[in-house]
Amino acid sequence: MSAVTATLTPSRPTGRLFFVDNLRVFLTILVVLHHTLITYTHAGSWLYMEGQPDFLASAVGAWLTATDHAFFMGLFLLISAYFVPGAYDRKGAGRFLKDRLIRLGIPLALYGWVIRPLFIYFATGGREKFGVSFWTWFTGQYFKVFGIIGGGPLWFIETLLIFSLVYVLWRIATENRPARPASESRFPGSGAIALFALGVAAATFVVRLGFPQDASFRPLNLQFANFAQYIALFVAGLIAYRRGWLAALPDKIGRRWLIIGALLILLFPALAIGTGALEDNTPFKGGWHWQAFVSAVWESFVCVSMCVGVIYAFRRWANTQGSLARFLSRNAYTAYLIHEPAIVALAMAVAGVMLYPLLKFVLVSLVAVPLCFALSALIRKIPGADRIV
């Protein structure tokens, strides 16, 4: 994520894109809020969940997490991909690959094979719960239960690394083609954007015939049900760089799709009630069900509309940085990397505080967000750490 966008800028002289830095911060905070919300509403999968939420808390949690899930990780991939071609052009295959392995591979391995297993073992009871030493549990059970790599939120770092490796292979395979310099071009019209969203929806529906939502390829902790969107947006980010689409996005189109996205989000409760999702949401997860197609269409149009609309909104109203924004931007990547143990530890520390789930979510979030960025700043003070995170 920040491993790409925080340090790399396009090769053409556009200046630093402050709105992209601010957008990354926003998405990082949204990830923290998303997982904190799951902790108290059970509207998804998470390492630690608390209590038994009532219908209202569960419904609100499902609405908000479905909305987040529809677009935020895809948008992360789009803005990450936007800076990949320029980085490769400047560095070449060897240096680009080395940088990706340092900035993505090292945190992925360190978190997946050291930090996360240690945290899970000792935070949940250690030998008293598991009955064996950490090393015995780690070598005998951890990988079977939690997968080989990419556990928790680090699946995204793993995915970005895989996509970057594929991009390197593609550039090497096509290196004899004439170079295509970055150039400005007209941003796609609303009709083309709608067709793109519909194509993503169709591809998502087809993929989910074999890989329904919530089904994970455990060894790598990847949910292939979402990869039609992720691949499409990563490729869109690559194309957007070459054609200068972030700068060329017209305000009119940005406003239009931001409104469309907001309306689709507001439509979710009525859609959930009218399609029977409250009684049984299984048909919406995949397979030959009309509900699965409706789900794919809603999700894809929310994704595309929010990607266009949010990029427009940040370019229009958040394209400057003060000292606080610079601090948050520098620490966004590390905050993402460590937010799982930070949130879980915080939630466990206040587990004895009895509050309504949605109220507790709000109060814990007010601590969780600054905690993640503060811990990030401390970690990055370790000598050499800022080279990696």
Image: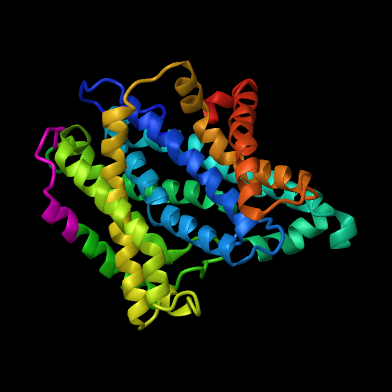
Q: Quadrant of residue 253?
A: top left
Q: Quadrant of residue 21?
A: top left
Determine the residue located farthest toward the top in the rendered image.
Answer: 323
Determine the residue located farthest toward the bottom in the rendered image.
Answer: 288
Note whether residue 172 is visible: no
Note whether residue 230 is visible: yes
Residue 42 belongs to magenta span: no
Q: Quadrant of the N terminus?
A: top left
Q: Whole-percent x and y of residue 100? A: 44, 38
Q: Whole-percent x and y of residue 297? A: 29, 67
Q: Whole-percent x and y of residue 9? A: 31, 27
Determine the residue located farthest toward the left in the rendered image.
Answer: 186
81 displayed left or right of 181 = right
Identify which residue is drawn at 78% across, 44% down: 349
Dominant secondary structure, magenta: loop
From which residue to which does the magenta span run?
Answer: 179-195
265 displayed left or right of 338 = left
- As rendered, which of 107 and 76 lies closer to the eye? 76
Q: Quadrant of the C terminus?
A: top right
In the picture shown, does residue 341 fall above or below 287? above
Identify which residue is drawn at 26% across, 69% down: 202
324 displayed left or right of 171 = right
Identify which residue is drawn at 52% across, 67% down: 216
Q: Quadrant of residue 148?
A: bottom right
Q: Whole-percent x and y of residue 108? A: 56, 44
- As rendered, which of 242 and 36 lies closer to the eye? 36
In the picture shown, does residue 296 fall above or below 377? below
Residue 184 belongs to magenta span: yes
Identify which residue is drawn at 53% across, 50% down: 34
In the picture shown, does residue 166 fall above or below 56? above
